[in-house]
């Protein structure tokens, strides 16, 4: 499906979504409040068939956080990238692991690395970091650890 | 959507109530986990109720580290990430930087990269085969696998200078030209390999005990494989077409003749067969290329200091374990602003709980073996 | 106590030939050390890349069973030597300490590869890597390389044998003082 068709289809689902076509794939920007509605529609829609989430990550922009979801359709071979802007002081977004089950692990990773709180996540705990690291978010830009980290 | 413990209790007779459940730890130091994976398994009798992976025993904070390394420097870290397919990891990173810088790679470099990729893939599958057979109780296949693997390592060492962590790719091509003996050595290897490959089937694949341990174990449906984000042989064992070499051809894969290996068994044996047949496809690719390496430069001329333009770049390649994605967010500087490695093992591991529930604890090793987990790749 | 550069076959002591049989004159300590050094059982402890080279040493081409190392044990209670093959991170460090504590005396440690020696390529800007396994447990022999070649590991294993025969490992010196 071409970028125009994808854009048309997503606008039908969520008229307030904004688009960025400069990259390789279509970028869709939505707010955290609208994202659960769009996610539900995206994974159910049989014309888009975006059934494969191949990447879920977060970027710390120092002023805000951005959740990045890369979605792919195994039947039609098109991709879209969804970006959700979050408040840095209190990042909260609804979990999408009901739609794509791979999100469960990836969201746990983002939770410990960036401190994003995923609502309705079935099991939001530390996955990689040892116990006692709750609240320290190593991939944030202002993370400092004078004991373990030797700066070059 | 989640298979709750309750459902298993209702469907499988002979399981006692809440009091009969207990937990055991497998790992972090356990030979069958191929590294330092820690699984907390809830059992009722011998039946697995739940498998809970605990990661991070080899979390080396590679993503944080890469934020302070330049685009030339960060490639070496990635060969320590998934060390069994280190050349393919380097390839992915080099491709991503080239995409950002819009560097045109010479044809010779592309061919060399693909040749090395396929040799790496064979070496990786060899090791998987030996280690998995060892997990299931057969020790001899390990020695057979390492016999062929050593000849690949020798070829690698001559050209790249290292046996395991090659760091042969640089943005714009490869680090140095092929060793003069390369073609002869590879042809010798092909000859040796073809004369030995039937031993694999005789020793392991055709063995009835082995088949009984693998067939019908760890059923993963195509729909679940997609939903859990599985890729590589794990997904292709469930007939999900997911070979990046076919779907998003990179390098010169679109000009080559090879088949995407698909199996419809959906069980551990299907995943096993995918890898065995994939080795033969890799041999096919090497045979097409080994006499047709074009002359020319092995490296494009690049600036000494690489600066990616502002933007986001994503490349994906097919490693021996599945889809590796490299996601670079650049702010225009000499180092990446944020880098994310979408590792195939991380998603493949997340499916373990789903496929293991309701089966016996003895089958867990067979399931873990066919997922082909490399723990540093999962933890990064 | 002097450091003797023994080869693997050298038996400590002198043989006095007599009609009808010989007499061996030796120290009991030397014989015990000689016996110990020739049947060291390693623990299968591989955290990352070096583990693959460790497996290559176990394979047919390099074959460490020539020197008495082939019985790789999966449990620390049956092992004599830990070969730390790979990076040790903060989460793994307590596990490594516990494994070392569970091993029966005498026990020896080989740090294989740059990560186990000093953190290696993961020294700077990482928040989770232990900068050298000797922060956690004492190490007898260090092997450089990233990963070391199989020959390098074999050399380390033979060095450890020589060290044990000479009575120069950390543990033997400590016992002598008591």
Image (cartoon, rainbow, N blue to C red):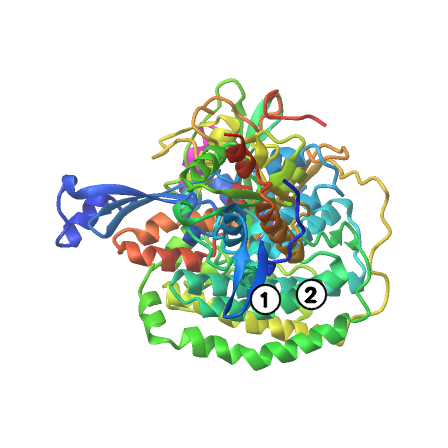
Between residues A23 and B29, which one lies in front from this camera angle? Answer: B29
Could you tell me if residue B314 is visible in this image? Answer: no
Q: Residue at x 67, y 31 (%)?
A: C124
Instruction: Report the residue that reaches farthest toward the top.
Output: A89
- Residue C119 in percent (x, y) is at 63, 36
Residue displayed at 42% across by 73% down: B204
The residue at 43%/53% (across/down) is C73
**Residue B271 percent coordinates (x, y):** 43, 64
Q: Chain of mark 1?
A: B
SS label for mark 2: helix
Q: Is residue B39 above or below residue A16?
A: below
Q: Which residue is mark 1?
A: B122
Q: Is residue A2 left or right of residue A31?
A: right
Assess whether mark 1 and mark 2 are in contact (beta carbons under 8 angstroms).
Answer: no
* Residue C128 occupies quadrant: top right
Neighbor class of circle 2 (other Cα within 10 Å; few <14, some 14-19, many 20+) is some
């Amino acid at each position: 499906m071409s970028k125009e068709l994808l854009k048309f289809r997503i606008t039908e689902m969520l008229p307030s979504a904004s688009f960025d076509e400069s990259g390789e794939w279509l970028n869709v920007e939505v707010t955290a409040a609208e994202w659960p509605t769009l996610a539900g529609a995206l994974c159910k829609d049989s014309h888009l068939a975006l059934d494969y989430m191949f990447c879920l990550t977060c970027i710390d922009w120092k002023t805000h956080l951005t959740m990045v979801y890369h979605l792919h359709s195994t039947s039609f071979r098109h991709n879209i990238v969804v970006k959700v802007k979050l408040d840095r002081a209190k990042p909260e977004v609804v979990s999408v692991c009901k739609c794509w089950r791979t999100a469960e692990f990836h969201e746990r990773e983002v939770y410990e690395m960036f401190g994003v709180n995923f609502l309705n996540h079935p099991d939001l705990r530390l996955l990689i970091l040892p116990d006692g690291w709750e609240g320290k978010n190593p991939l944030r830009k202002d993370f400092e650890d004078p004991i373990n980290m030797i700066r070059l | 959507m989640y298979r709750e413990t309750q459902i298993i209790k209702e469907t499988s007779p002979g399981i006692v109530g809440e009091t009969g459940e207990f937990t055991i730890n497998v790992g972090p130091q356990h030979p069958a986990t191929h590294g330092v994976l820690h699984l907390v398994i809830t059992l009722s009798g011998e039946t697995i109720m739940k498998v809970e992976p605990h990661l991070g025993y080899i979390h080396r904070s590679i993503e944080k580290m890469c934020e302070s390394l330049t685009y030339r420097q960060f490639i070496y870290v990635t060969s320590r990430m998934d060390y069994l397919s280190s050349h393919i990891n380097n390839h992915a990173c080099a491709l991503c930087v080239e995409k950002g810088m819009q560097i045109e790679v010479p044809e010779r470099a592309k061919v060399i990269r693909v040749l090395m990729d396929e040799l790496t893939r064979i070496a990786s599958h060899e090791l998987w085969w030996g280690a998995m057979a060892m997990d299931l109780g057969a020790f001899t296949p390990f020695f057979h696998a390492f016999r062929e693997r050593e000849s690949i390592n020798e070829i690698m060492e001559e050209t790249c200078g290292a046996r395991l962590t090659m760091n042969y790719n640089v943005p714009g091509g490869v680090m140095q030209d092929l060793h003069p003996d390369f073609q002869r050595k590879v042809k010798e290897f092909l000859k040796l390999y073809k004369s030995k490959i039937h031993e694999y089937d005789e020793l392991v694949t055709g063995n009835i005990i082995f088949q009984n341990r693998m067939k019908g174990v760890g059923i993963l449906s195509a729909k679940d494989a997609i939903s859990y984000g599985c890729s590589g042989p794990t997904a292709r064992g469930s007939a999900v077409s997911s070979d990046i070499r076919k779907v998003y051809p990179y390098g010169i894969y679109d000009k080559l003749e090879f088949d995407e290996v698909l199996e419809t068994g959906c069980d551990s044996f299907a995943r096993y067969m995918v890898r065995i047949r994939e080795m033969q496809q890799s041999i096919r690719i090497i045979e097409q290329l080994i006499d047709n390496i074009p002359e020319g430069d092995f490296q494009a001329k690049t600036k000494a200091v690489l600066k990616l333009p502002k933007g986001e770049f994503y490349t994906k390649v097919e490693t021996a374990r599945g889809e590796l994605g490299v996601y670079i967010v650049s702010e225009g500087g000499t180092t990446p602003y944020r880098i994310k490695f979408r590792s195939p093992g991380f998603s493949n591991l997340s499916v373990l709980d789903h496929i293991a529930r309701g089966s016996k604890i003895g089958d867990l090793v067979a399931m873990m073996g066919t997922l082909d987990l490399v723990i540093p790749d999962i933890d990064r | 106590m002097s450091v003797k550069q023994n080869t693997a076959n050298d038996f400590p002591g002198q043989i006095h030939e007599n009609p009808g049989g010989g007499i061996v004159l030796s120290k009991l300590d030397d014989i015990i050390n000689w016996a110990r050094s020739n049947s060291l059982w390693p623990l299968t402890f591989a955290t990352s890349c070096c583990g693959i080279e460790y497996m290559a040493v176990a394979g047919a081409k390099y074959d460490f069973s020539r020197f008495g190392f082939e019985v790789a044990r999966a449990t620390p209670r049956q092992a004599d030597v830990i070969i730390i093959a790979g990076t040790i991170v903060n989460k793994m460090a307590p596990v490594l300490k516990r494994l070392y504590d569970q091993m029966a005396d005498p026990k020896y440690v080989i740090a294989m590869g740059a990560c186990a020696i000093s953190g290696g390529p993961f020294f700077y800007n990482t928040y989770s890597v232990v900068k050298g396994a000797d922060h956690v447990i004492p190490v007898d022999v260090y092997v450089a390389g990233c990963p070391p070649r199989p020959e390098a590991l074999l050399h380390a294993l033979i060095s450890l044998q020589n060290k044990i025969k000479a009575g120069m490992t950390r543990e033997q010196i400590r016992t002598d003082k008591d």
